[in-house]
Image (cartoon, grey):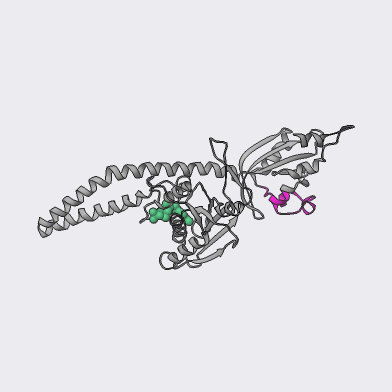
């Protein structure tokens, strides 16, 4: 506050405010001014970054060089030009070959003193959307925990009784009936195996979280895959070698990436299939924890990308739920397990899928114990 006051006033009166260009350049949103003939007359710094071009190069060009003419974003601009009133639209897709696919909020308004211009502000929605989606995944994780506890109680115990009885029958039965008794035993074994796989979801003993080298985790999973389910896959590693350790549980993180990489390998049926493993450090991205004032910092991002068939649109909304599968032999537990473990780590998982490009981004917390120790010394 004191700083602000000294900026705004001088002993001799009120100081001029900073020039508007500096103010606009300090904003994180794209701000642009479009003239009535659809040429770009101004673009702020955030806009240069968003559209990956310099303002000096882009001003004077037609807006269609940045935004395709059939884009709903341009429809908003047209609406403002035609009606002369401000328009805001939320969650519009903005897809261009130059910058890829984005979901944006758009605010466009006329300039009453300059009727030949419209101001367009564009905000990326990915962070807001991530938090929405994160909630969905957390919900999925919780419902699976409850289901796992119920299965252990209500299904596993009676099943062991059924299995025991079938075994007794098998011992004394005729050859013909032995086959049926064995069938009962085998089927109960199959269900017990499924329920056992669910056990991992129930909130049992708390697991220990410590420093985990995520590149070692990925290396181990890659090795496992190359000797079994991913023999047909060409792996590409795109690692940030200076990445700090994750705060997590090694075995559980192996489970997470094993499931994600197995899904990626299973989505690739043709030769030429590629799975790209990327790690990166993301500065300054914090997520508000819904319902509290705290904010979590998840700077480590691990991405698993494949060029397979893509995830069918009709399951994208609930594929993290248990038993959702499109595979004849699938149990639909892989992603539910991934959601549960990432939730237990305080992390987030995000999805971006279209044919030939499916990416799961996993954002995880960093282990800060090393830096804490070095600060103490
Ligand atoms: N990388 C991917 N590409 C295409 N589809 C995917 C991908 N990852 C997941 N899916 C879809 O999501 C569904 C759910 O995945 P999930 O791992 O939970 O179960 P599953 O792989 O079918 O069975 P399980 O992992 O238990 O063997 C899959 O059946 C598939 O349709
Ligand atoms: Mg799977």
| Residue drawn at (48%, 42%) of the image | 136
Residue 14 x/y as whole percent? 86, 32
- Residue that lies at the very extreme toward the right in this rendered image: 12
Q: Between 111 and 228, which is closer to the camera in this rendering?
A: 228
Residue 184 x/y as whole percent? 20, 53
Can residue 306 be seen by looking at this rendering? no
Indicate whether residue 107 is drawn in magenta: no
Q: Between 335 and 164, which is closer to the camera in this rendering?
A: 164
Residue 162 x/y as whole percent? 20, 48
Image quadrant where residue 225 sits? bottom left
Residue 239 x/y as whole percent? 57, 62
- In the rendered view of the protein, which quadrant contains the N terminus? top right
Image quadrant where residue 13 sits? top right
Q: Which residues are magenta?
A: 47-69
Q: Between 344 and 323, which is closer to the camera in this rendering?
A: 344
Can residue 98 be seen by looking at this rendering? yes
Indicate whether residue 56 is drawn in magenta: yes
- Residue that lies at the very extreme toward the front in this rendered image: 377
Q: Is residue 135 left or right of residue 40?
A: left
Up-down: is 240 above or below 33?
below
Point out the quarter of the image occupied by ligand 2: bottom left
């Amino acid at each position: 506050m004191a700083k602000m006051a000294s900026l705004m006033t001088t002993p001799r009166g009120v100081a001029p405010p900073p020039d508007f260009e500096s103010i606009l350049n300090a904003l994180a949103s794209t701000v642009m001014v479009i003239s009535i003939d659809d040429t770009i007359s101004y673009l702020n710094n955030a806009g240069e970054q968003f559209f990956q071009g310099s303002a000096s190069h882009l001003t004077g060009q037609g807006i269609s060089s940045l935004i395709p003419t059939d884009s709903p974003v341009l429809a908003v601009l047209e609406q403002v030009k035609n009606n002369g009133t401000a328009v805001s639209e939320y969650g519009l897709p903005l897809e261009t070959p130059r910058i890829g696919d984005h979901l944006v909020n758009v605010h466009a308004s006329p300039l009453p003193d300059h009727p030949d211009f419209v101001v367009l502000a564009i905000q990326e929605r990915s962070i807001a959307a991530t938090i929405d989606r994160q909630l969905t995944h957390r919900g999925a994780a919780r419902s699976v925990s409850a289901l796992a506890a119920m299965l252990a109680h209500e299904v596993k115990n009676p099943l062991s009784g059924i299995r025991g009885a079938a075994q007794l029958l098998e011992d004394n039965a005729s050859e013909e009936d032995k086959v049926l008794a064995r069938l009962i035993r085998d089927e109960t074994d199959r269900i017990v195996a499924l329920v056992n796989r669910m056990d991992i979801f129930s909130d049992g003993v708390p697991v220990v979280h410590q420093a985990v080298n995520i590149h070692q985790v990925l290396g181990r999973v890659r090795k496992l895959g190359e000797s079994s389910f991913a023999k047909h896959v060409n792996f590409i590693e795109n690692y940030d070698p200076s990445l700090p350790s994750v705060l997590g549980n090694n075995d559980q993180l192996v489970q997470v990436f094993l499931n994600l990489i197995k899904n990626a390998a299973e989505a690739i049926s043709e030769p030429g299939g590629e799975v790209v493993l990327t790690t990166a450090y993301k500065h300054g991205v914090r997520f508000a924890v819904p319902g509290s004032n705290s904010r979590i910092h998840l700077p480590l991002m691990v991405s698993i990308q494949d060029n397979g068939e893509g995830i069918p649109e009709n399951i994208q909304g609930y594929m993290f739920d248990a038993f959702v599968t499109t595979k004849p032999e699938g149990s639909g537990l892989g992603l539910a397990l991934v959601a549960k473990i990432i939730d237990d780590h305080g992390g987030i998982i995000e999805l971006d899928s279209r044919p030939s490009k499916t990416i799961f981004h996993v954002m995880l917390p960093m282990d800060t114990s090393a830096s804490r120790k070095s600060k103490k010394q």
